[in-house]
Image: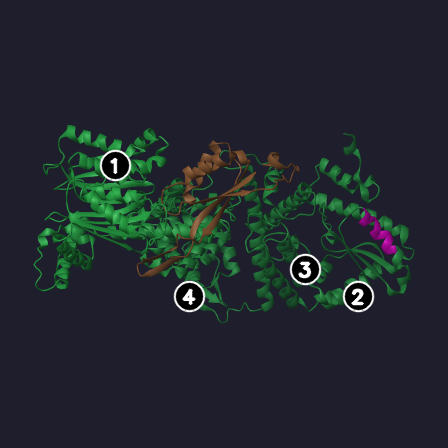
Chain colours: A green, B brown
């Protein structure tokens, strides 16, 4: 290609800048070389302009500042330029400024420019921290050497010499400001290559500070001064070089000055960096893992550096005031020290002891101790990993007041992955979607932080948890199966079990850990996707989870996991659904807490207690025989209500049917009392249907003397107006129906005709189910009918039963989801169970037909 | 053109989406909303602690369709979202004056 042969310096003028950059790209110049060439290109042009238009060059100096001063000019970076002038030459200033700046503006370059005398510079530097810092990188492009030297001399005297502590303080303030604005973490979904933790700002801050405080001008001299080890230096340089390449490419890809690795650029960037999609991991996830890894290196290295500088300037590293915590470990100036780095080489138990002391005292490890740990990770071997003593300390850390802080130190030093090698796979592992703000390892730690918070927020639920260490461990490991493709929860559970065995957990603890990791998505999936009014489903959940403690742990883990995933995953809305699910299962589990035997016992006690209560409430001369009442009946109502039933029953001598209705909180309640007779229930349900009342629940009992006592909860299908309901007409019709003087069948068919215009027979029949069970009850056959709910269905069922001559002694009417589930305790017309297979089948078919009619 | 807004139970979302896809409706806007209505929030007491949620979590779907499709869409949503119980939700139909696709500037039916 002809273009590639052209030396980019040959392009004339700034307009050729883009072509020049393109030509560099084509020559495969990238990284530092590219930003340097770009800077040289601008230098060359500016020097030309300056030469042409500065008649008295001794009065002017063209100075590059900031990134441009460092000769690092990214494709769309600002060009920070300062025209320094001697006030004696003020007259010629205008023409020079025009000659320099106009062409830059004309080409649309972003120019940060200033025109100042050396004195003005000094005054401005006092006010402006950023200018003060950018002066550290000031570089003369063209013009008067003495003028420039005068400024740098003044600057050095005023702002560097004797100002080390002030400089450091300013730098630390800026760092913490950035942490607040861009987050404390290197692993946010869309990292800012310049300002995020572990970005260029951190690198520069370190180099500037090294310059001002120690007079060290570059990374190599930091190493020579012993501030960085050879390994730290090469890791750091590698990270820095990677970030330069990313920033270059990012400008190129975005076509503007953009230093944030936006989600939509990440895939293209990954491709540009040569990553390919693999079965278990996307190219973009590989790429982002590298990015996070390098930013993490920068972040940790600079953190350690600033701690070091603070200590040197504070000159407070004397062993005075040291307090020994245990042999070999002491606390000095609020930090935990390993007294002698050799200790860890001879006794690897010191690894965990150090973290244990950090957890116990609530104090961080000193940076030199952290460096010692990182430098000696090769000593963490299988023996240490399966040591019971070390495991005991680790578990103690998990239940300390701040496990998050200590685990974070473990992760940052590399110890966590050394101790739990399964963790290696999730280190810096990115997940390319918009929900996961953190890399997997950070997400796991964040989950611990959220569990810590939940201990304060939910003391009641936490009180149910008897082994908090297992909950924290589950939080730490719940995603450990990620990075291998689908099914991370199952894989993670198997891995967690292995880890747990190594840590010497008890069998029941292993079960709990396995359960929590395996099921960690269950509640959040269920809360969103299942009908929380489906009793049958809830019962199954309760049976699966089976212990209130497991449920509480799973609930807390679910919330912590969601909150630790990202801001879009957790909100009040999901919280409400999850809470509802939790409480429903919890209440079921509480009920099931009692064993069957206990339940039987408590039922017996309950019956006795109720009989006593009822006797106490009845007038002293009352002769009611309690043998009339089944246990089931007695347990279904409060004593006051039973007393009411007994006193009402006396009226039946003069009145054939008693009918009451009342409005309760959630529904309307109807009470019917009369002598039992064949088809009674069908007639009651028929009248209810005629009056548009849906049966929500019903308690149907027959006393031994043949008194039917029916309590029915209903709601109107058409109106919510209780007073507007025609109760009088209904009572009349009920009387007529019971006396067999009402044509229920024809009235209902006329009423329901408009609703039955859609033949759905086949579909309905598929959904319906009828079961006849002779085992469930000693005395009765139990018929269960499942079907789609519709108006009048209960009439159809009970009418069919009555047609078969079947007497209903008890019934439970209820709905699950959009299904009705009705349970009838019945005997045939001879007062026997329904045993004959042929009759059983006939009845079954008859009922199926009844519920399938639409 | 009409805008159909349906407020449904969250767990019914997948069913309704699938049913709508079945009749050729692919585009919709879905949001998590809080209902404060006749179906009140609830208060639950568990192990001595009181838990109150004063709203009911619901899902809102918004769909813009040609007027000829309105009945179909309504019936599909109604059937798919129905559990027969309180709180199944509501469907609103609103007139839409104009639809413009931002990218191309297409208007009306073309832009749906």
In terms of depth relative to the viewer, which is nearer, A17 or A34?
Answer: A17
Magenta extent: A96-106
Foreground: disc 1 or disc 3: 1
Give the mark, 4 or 1, whose residue is nearer the N terminus.
4
Q: Which residue is mark 1?
A: A745
In terms of depth relative to the viewer, which is nearer, A635 or A754?
Answer: A754
Q: Residues within 10 Å of mark 4 (few under 14, many from 20)?
A: some
Would you place residue B67 above or below residue A736 in this image? above
Give the mark, 3 or 2, whose residue is nearer the N terminus.
2
Q: Residues within 10 Å of mark 1 (few under 14, many from 20)?
A: some
Foreground: disc 4 or disc 1: 1
Q: Which residue is mark 4?
A: A325
How many marks on residues? Answer: 4
The residues tagged by marks 4 and 1 sit, at their Cα atoms, a distance apart of 89 Å
The residues tagged by marks 2 and 4 sit, at their Cα atoms, a distance apart of 55 Å
Give the mark, 2 or 4, whose residue is nearer the N terminus.
2
């Amino acid at each position: 290609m002809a273009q590639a042969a052209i030396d980019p310096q040959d392009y004339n003028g700034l307009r050729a800048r883009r072509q020049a950059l393109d030509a560099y790209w084509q020559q495969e110049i990238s990284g530092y070389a590219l930003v340097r060439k770009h800077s040289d290109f601008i230098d060359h042009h500016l020097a030309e302009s300056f030469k042409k238009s500065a008649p008295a060059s001794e009065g002017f100096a063209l100075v590059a500042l900031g990134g441009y001063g460092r000769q690092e000019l990214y494709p769309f970076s600002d060009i920070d330029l300062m025209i320094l002038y001697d006030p004696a030459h003020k007259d010629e200033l205008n023409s020079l400024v025009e000659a320099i700046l106009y062409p830059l503006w004309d080409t649309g370059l972003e120019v940060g420019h200033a025109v100042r005398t050396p004195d003005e510079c000094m005054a401005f530097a006092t006010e402006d921290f950023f200018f003060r810092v950018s002066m550290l990188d000031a570089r003369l492009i063209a013009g008067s050497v003495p003028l420039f030297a005068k400024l740098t001399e003044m600057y050095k005297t005023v702002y560097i010499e004797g100002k080390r502590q002030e400089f450091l303080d300013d730098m630390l303030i800026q760092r913490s400001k950035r942490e607040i604005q861009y987050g404390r973490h290197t692993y946010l979904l869309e990292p800012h290559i310049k300002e995020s933790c572990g970005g260029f700002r951190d690198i520069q801050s370190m180099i500037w500070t090294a310059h001002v405080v120690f007079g060290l001008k570059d990374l190599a001299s930091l190493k020579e001064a012993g501030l960085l080890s050879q390994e730290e230096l090469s890791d750091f340089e590698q990270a820095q070089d990677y970030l330069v390449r990313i920033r270059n490419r990012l400008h190129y890809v975005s076509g503007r000055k953009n230093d944030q690795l936006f989600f939509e650029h990440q895939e293209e960037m990954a491709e540009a960096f040569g990553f390919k999609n693999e079965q278990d991991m996307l190219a973009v996830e590989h790429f982002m893992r590298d990015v996070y890894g390098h930013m993490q290196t920068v972040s940790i290295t600079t953190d350690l550096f600033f701690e070091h500088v603070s200590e040197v300037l504070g000159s407070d590293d004397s062993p005075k005031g040291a307090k020994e915590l245990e042999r070999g470990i002491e606390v000095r100036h609020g930090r935990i020290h390993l007294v002698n780095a050799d200790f860890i080489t001879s006794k690897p138990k010191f690894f965990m002891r150090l973290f244990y002391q950090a957890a116990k005292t609530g104090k961080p490890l000193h940076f030199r101790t952290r460096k010692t740990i990182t430098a000696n990770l090769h000593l963490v071997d299988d023996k240490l990993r399966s040591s019971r003593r070390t495991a005991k300390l680790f578990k103690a850390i998990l239940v300390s007041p701040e496990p998050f802080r200590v685990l974070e130190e473990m992760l940052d030093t590399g110890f966590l992955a050394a101790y739990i090698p399964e963790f290696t796979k999730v280190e810096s592992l990115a997940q390319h979607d918009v929900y996961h703000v953190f890399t997997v390892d950070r997400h796991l730690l964040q989950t611990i932080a959220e569990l810590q918070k939940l201990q304060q927020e939910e003391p009641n639920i936490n009180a149910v948890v008897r082994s908090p260490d297992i909950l924290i461990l589950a939080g730490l490991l719940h995603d450990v199966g990620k990075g291998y493709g689908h099914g991370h929860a199952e894989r993670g559970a198997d891995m967690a079990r292995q880890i747990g065995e190594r840590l010497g957990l008890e069998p029941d603890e292993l079960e709990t850990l396995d359960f929590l990791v395996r099921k960690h998505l269950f509640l959040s999936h269920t809360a969103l996707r299942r009908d929380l009014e489906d009793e049958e489903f809830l019962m199954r959940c309760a049976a699966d989870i089976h212990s209130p403690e497991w449920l509480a742990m799973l609930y807390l883990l679910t919330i912590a996991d969601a909150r630790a995933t990202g801001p879009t995953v957790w909100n009040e809305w999901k919280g409400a659904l999850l809470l509802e699910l939790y409480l429903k299962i919890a209440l079921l589990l509480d009920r099931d807490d009692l064993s069957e035997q206990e339940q039987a016992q408590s039922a017996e006690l309950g019956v006795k207690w109720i009989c006593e209560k009822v006797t106490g409430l009845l007038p002293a001369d009352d002769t009611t025989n309690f043998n009339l009442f089944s246990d089931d009946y007695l347990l279904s109502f409060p004593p006051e209500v039973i007393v009411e039933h007994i006193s009402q029953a006396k009226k039946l001598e003069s009145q054939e049917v008693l009918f009451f209705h009342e409005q309760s909180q959630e529904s309307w309640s109807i009470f019917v009392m009369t002598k039992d007779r064949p088809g009674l229930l069908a007639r009651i349900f028929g009248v209810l249907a005629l009056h548009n009342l849906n049966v929500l629940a019903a308690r149907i009992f027959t006393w031994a003397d043949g008194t039917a006592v029916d309590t029915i909860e209903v709601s109107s299908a058409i109106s919510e107006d209780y007073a507007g309901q025609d109760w009088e007409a209904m009572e009349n019709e009920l009387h007529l129906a019971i006396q067999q003087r009402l044509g229920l069948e024809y009235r209902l068919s006329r009423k329901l005709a408009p609703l039955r215009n859609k033949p759905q027979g086949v579909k309905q029949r598929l959904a319906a189910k009828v079961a006849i069970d002779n085992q469930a009850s000693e005395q009765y056959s139990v018929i269960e009918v499942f079907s789609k709910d519709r108006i009048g269905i209960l009439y159809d069922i009970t009418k069919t039963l009555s047609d078969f001559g079947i007497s209903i002694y008890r019934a439970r009417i209820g709905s699950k989801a959009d299904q009705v589930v009705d349970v009838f305790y019945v005997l045939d017309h001879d007062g026997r169970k329904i045993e004959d297979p042929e009759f059983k089948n006939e009845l079954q078919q008859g009922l199926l037909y009844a519920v399938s009619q639409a | 053109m009409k805008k159909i807004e349906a407020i449904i139970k969250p767990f019914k979302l997948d069913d309704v989406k699938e049913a709508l896809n079945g009749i050729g409706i692919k585009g919709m806007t879905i949001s998590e909303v809080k209902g404060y209505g006749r179906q009140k929030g609830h208060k639950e007491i568990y192990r001595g602690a009181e838990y109150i949620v004063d709203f009911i979590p619901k899902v809102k779907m918004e769909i813009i369709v040609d007027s000829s499709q309105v009945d179909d869409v309504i019936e599909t949503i109604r059937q798919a979202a129905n559990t027969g119980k309180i709180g199944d939700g509501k469907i609103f139909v609103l007139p839409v004056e104009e639809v413009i696709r931002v990218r191309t500037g297409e208007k009306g039916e073309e832009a749906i």
